Image (cartoon, rainbow, N blue to C red):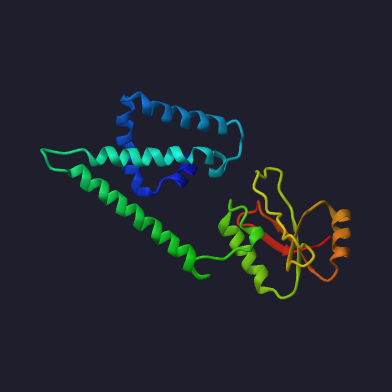
Amino acid sequence: MRYYRFFFLAPLYLALPVFLVMLREFRYVWILLTLLIFGAGTNFYPYFYPHYIAAVTCLFVLVSVAGLDRLSRLSIRNWPAGRDAARLIFFLSAAHFLFWYAVHAFGDERGLIQYETWDAINHDDPQGRISINKRLAEVSGEHLVFVRYYRQHSFDEWVYNAADVDGARVVWARDLGSTENEKLRHYYSSRTAWLLEPDFRPPRLTAYRP
């Protein structure tokens, strides 16, 4: 469920309960039913990212807008408290968005580590990746990193390479055993070889030894 936070800025949580009140009208019931069907369907696959249900993004937006609209029409003893609350939520949402947009747009490497394209694909362990990338960046020359997964490894993948693999500063490869690894080491003989164990906590990077 934590992935659904992707579709709602934190202030919008205040508008969601108001939308539930609107379910007394059938035209809003189908919205909830559609979201529940999509949510249930994604549970048949053991891995999940928000873009897996991107097709219903418009419904998440509709839920937020409908909730704010309903809230804006609430009044307490002829005082338009709902309208003020809806405006406050709207401005808080705008401020929330601008804050995080500025962090990602202007953050330096003390607050936001920039990823190469191939490393930005997966963020299952962002802190682990940051530390590994930082260490590789501090060592001069080109590198070959063998990634050794433990048996309990989940679906998150660490082996991503640039389109020009041979021209990349860091080449990532699965650990296939000493025989196969030596073939790759021979091909990339000028690179420094490393062994990465991403399932170790924290992820461990050591010099590769056959």
Residue 162, placed above or below residue 154: below
Q: Nearer the viewer, residue 103 or 153?
A: 103
Which residue shows up at 65% across the image and 44% down it? 155
Residue 127 appears left or right of 207: left
The percent coordinates of residue 183 (x first, y second) are 89, 59
Q: Nearer the viewer, residue 78 or 4?
A: 78
The percent coordinates of residue 129 (x first, y second) are 61, 59
In the rendered image, which quarter is residue 52 located in?
Answer: top right
- Image quarter in which the C terminus is found: bottom right
Q: Nearer the viewer, residue 126 or 209?
A: 126
Residue 106, placed above or below residue 117: below
In the rendered image, which quarter is residue 46 located in?
Answer: top right
Residue 82 appears left or right of 169: left
Residue 51 appears left or right of 149: left
The percent coordinates of residue 76 (x first, y second) are 14, 38
Which residue shows up at 61% across the image and 34% down it? 45
In the rendered image, which quarter is residue 41 located in?
Answer: top right
The percent coordinates of residue 209 (x first, y second) are 81, 62
Which residue shows up at 38% across the image and 38% down it? 63
- Residue furthest to the bottom in view is 140
Which residue shows up at 39% across the image and 26% down it? 29
Q: How many marks?
A: 0
